Image (cartoon, rainbow, N blue to C red):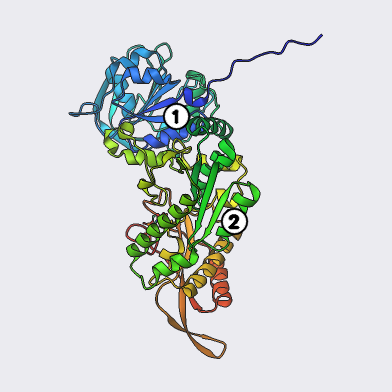
């Protein structure tokens, strides 16, 4: 006798039951969403102006109210739809969000004498939902002037600090939770654990948001969007376009054609790696355009950085259009737009960012007049999630963890005119920097590390001969987002090896210098 097959209902996809971060304009709102996702629960940012109906329609597992710069009593301080409290959805208020909750639900918020900025010693109650399993003494990171002086009606206080006797409250019956400190920042010792307690224990959110789940959902979505139409994708060699392309390929196979325009300004062996990985390993239909000569010709005699960028961008579009034209009717274009691009192009941070979310056309400035509809499989993902998806799809480690690299590539790291000779020098010098940085195990720690070729020469002596040759500048920075950066304190022995190798191995170079400027006032790139 055979056992009857047990049929289980399909689990809802993680995206169908999100945790919504209600944005009150705090500097960490995006970070909260990222932390929730790190707990493997799908999360999105929504503006504080969102209506209770719109929230209900999203069927969220929980709401997290972000911090914000305002005082809840200030004129025009951001509020939210009071009907949100009636939905019975678990809510966690952070900083401003906590204070708003207290104000709305019969508690009290006051400007006390003791503002708190930075580290605070918390005494937490272990017999609580938020602090279960955590030590009763812990460090929280605070940033507030106002304080909650009475919790919402029915809520009890579960953590306190010297300056904020009400550092956390909870009301399990009403499903309302608030913390004055910022669980999302790394300085809060058990911040991620507090978030997990809220997500797993209170909201009962399953940790189902994994790279595998993303791949499944996004490939299904791509199929639904494009049907049996032809789809195009421009590969740049960067991780975003690569992961977007692989997702599309997994979804629709040979309906996809990737176009890789080799402008000749990539790093040593990178163009070959793209061709090998996509064409050779993954068997993605790939048009590889060797346009190196065309691009060099377009840059002849040009030394102005912006003019270089403009010409490269223009030429890129021209080549891409020519190739696309050869493919016949194509209706869709895959782009590697990320969630952070989407949020940023929404603008108006104080407004609640997601209010004006719009599509962000950010890949190589592709032509609008080609009239292609966009397929953006990464538009809900943060960069680290894109990398995880890339790993899950089997992309080589080198590609998944590649440092950011500018579209115009080495052309804007050669100061002055780009010639074949100077390009060859920089490419080799840059390869030495990459090689040694990787060998020293520093590659992933650094935001970017590369070589720059200035437009000067200096005197040296090699053997018995006087030389008059180029210097190479080493540029290595740490950064979180490229908006600010610090020069990396590379170990002397690594610098020594790099310098020795560059000068000995590369004819035309007789000196190596190190760029020790932070951004601002310098920029990361030299052009
Ligand atoms: P800067 O030099 O302004 O660079 O500090 C900040 C970040 O942007 C990258 N960058 C570019 N990326 N096209 C790009 O795609 C460009 O023209 C470009 N210029 C700079 C730079 O590498 C750094 O990560």
Q: Can residue 75 be seen in this view?
A: yes
Distance, label 2 to label 1, CA atoms, is: 34 Å
Quadrant where the image shows the N terminus: top right
Discs 2/1, front: 2
Q: Name the residue under label 1.
A: 43
Q: Position of residue 228 (x, y in %)?
A: 53, 34
Q: Can residue 157 be seen in this view?
A: no
Q: Where is residue 502 in the image (x, y as percent from the top left)?
A: 55, 73
Work out whether 268 lies above or below 7: below
- When asked about the image quadrant of residue 75, the answer is top left
Q: Name the residue under label 2.
A: 273
Left or right placement of residue 121 versus residue 253 in this view: left
Few, some or many C-alpha atoms within 10 Å of disc 1 (few <14, some 14-19, many ≥20)?
A: many
Q: Quadrant of ligand 1?
A: bottom left
- When asked about the image quadrant of residue 253, the answer is top right
- When asked about the image quadrant of residue 148, the answer is top left
Cβ–Cβ under 8 Å for marks 2 and 1:
no
Tell which of 349 and 414 is nearer to you.
414
Q: What element does badge 2 sit on? A: helix
Q: Which residue is drawn at 45% across and 73% down?
A: 419
Q: Position of residue 312 (x, y in %)?
A: 40, 61
Disc with the residue nearer the chain's start (2 vs 1): 1
């Amino acid at each position: 006798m055979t056992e009857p097959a047990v049929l289980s209902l399909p689990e809802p996809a993680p995206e169908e039951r999100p945790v919504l971060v209600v944005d009150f304009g705090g500097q960490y709102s995006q970070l909260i969403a990222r932390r929730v996702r790190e707990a493997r629960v799908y999360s999105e940012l929504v503006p504080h102006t969102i209506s209770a109906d719109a929230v209900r329609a999203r069927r969220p597992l929980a709401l997290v109210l972000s911090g914000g710069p305002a005082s809840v009593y200030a004129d025009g301080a951001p509020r939210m739809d009071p009907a949100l409290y009636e939905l019975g959805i678990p809510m966690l208020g952070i900083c401003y969000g906590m204070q708003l909750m207290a104000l709305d639900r019969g508690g009290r918020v006051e400007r006390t004498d003791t503002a708190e900025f930075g580290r605070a010693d918390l005494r937490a109650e272990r017999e609580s939902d938020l602090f279960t399993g955590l030590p009763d003494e812990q460090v929280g990171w605070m940033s507030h002037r106002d304080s909650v002086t009475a919790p919402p009606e029915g809520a009890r206080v579960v953590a306190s600090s010297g300056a904020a006797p009400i550092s956390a409250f909870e009301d399990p019956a009403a499903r309302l939770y608030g913390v004055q400190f910022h669980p999302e920042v790394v300085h809060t010792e058990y911040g991620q654990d507090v978030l997990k307690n809220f997500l797993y224990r209170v909201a009962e959110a399953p940790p189902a948001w994994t790279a595998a789940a993303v791949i499944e959902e996004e490939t299904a979505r791509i199929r639904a969007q494009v049907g049996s139409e032809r789809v195009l994708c421009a590969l740049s060699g960067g991780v975003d376009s690569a992961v977007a392309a692989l997702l599309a390929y997994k979804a629709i196979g040979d309906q996809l054609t990737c176009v890789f325009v080799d402008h000749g300004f990539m790093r040593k062996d990178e163009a070959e790696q793209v061709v090998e990985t996509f064409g050779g390993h993954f068997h993605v239909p790939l048009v590889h355009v060797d346009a190196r000569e065309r691009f060099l010709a377009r840059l002849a005699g040009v030394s102005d950085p912006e003019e270089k960028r403009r010409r490269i961008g223009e030429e890129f579009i021209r080549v891409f259009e020519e190739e696309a034209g050869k493919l016949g009717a194509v209706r869709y274009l895959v782009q590697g737009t990320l969630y952070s691009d989407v949020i940023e192009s929404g603008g108006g941070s104080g407004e609640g960012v997601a209010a004006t979310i719009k599509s962000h056309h950010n890949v190589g400035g592709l032509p609008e007049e080609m009239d292609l509809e966009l397929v953006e499989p990464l538009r809900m993902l943060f960069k680290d999630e894109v990398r995880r998806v890339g790993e899950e799809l089997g992309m080589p480690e080198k590609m998944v963890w590649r440092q950011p690299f500018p579209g115009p590539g080495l052309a804007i790291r050669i100061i002055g005119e780009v010639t074949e000779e100077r390009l060859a020098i920089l490419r080799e010098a840059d390869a030495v920097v990459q090689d040694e940085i990787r060998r020293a195990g520093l590659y992933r720690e650094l935001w970017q590390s590369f070589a720059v070729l200035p437009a000067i020469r200096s005197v040296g002596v090699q053997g018995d001969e006087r030389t008059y040759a180029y210097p190479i500048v080493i540029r290595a920075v740490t950064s979180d987002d490229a908006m600010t950066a610090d020069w990396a304190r590379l170990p002397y022995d690594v610098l020594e090896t790099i310098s020795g190798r560059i000068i000995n191995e590369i004819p035309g170079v007789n000196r190596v210098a190190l760029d020790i400027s932070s951004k601002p006032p310098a920029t990361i790139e030299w052009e």
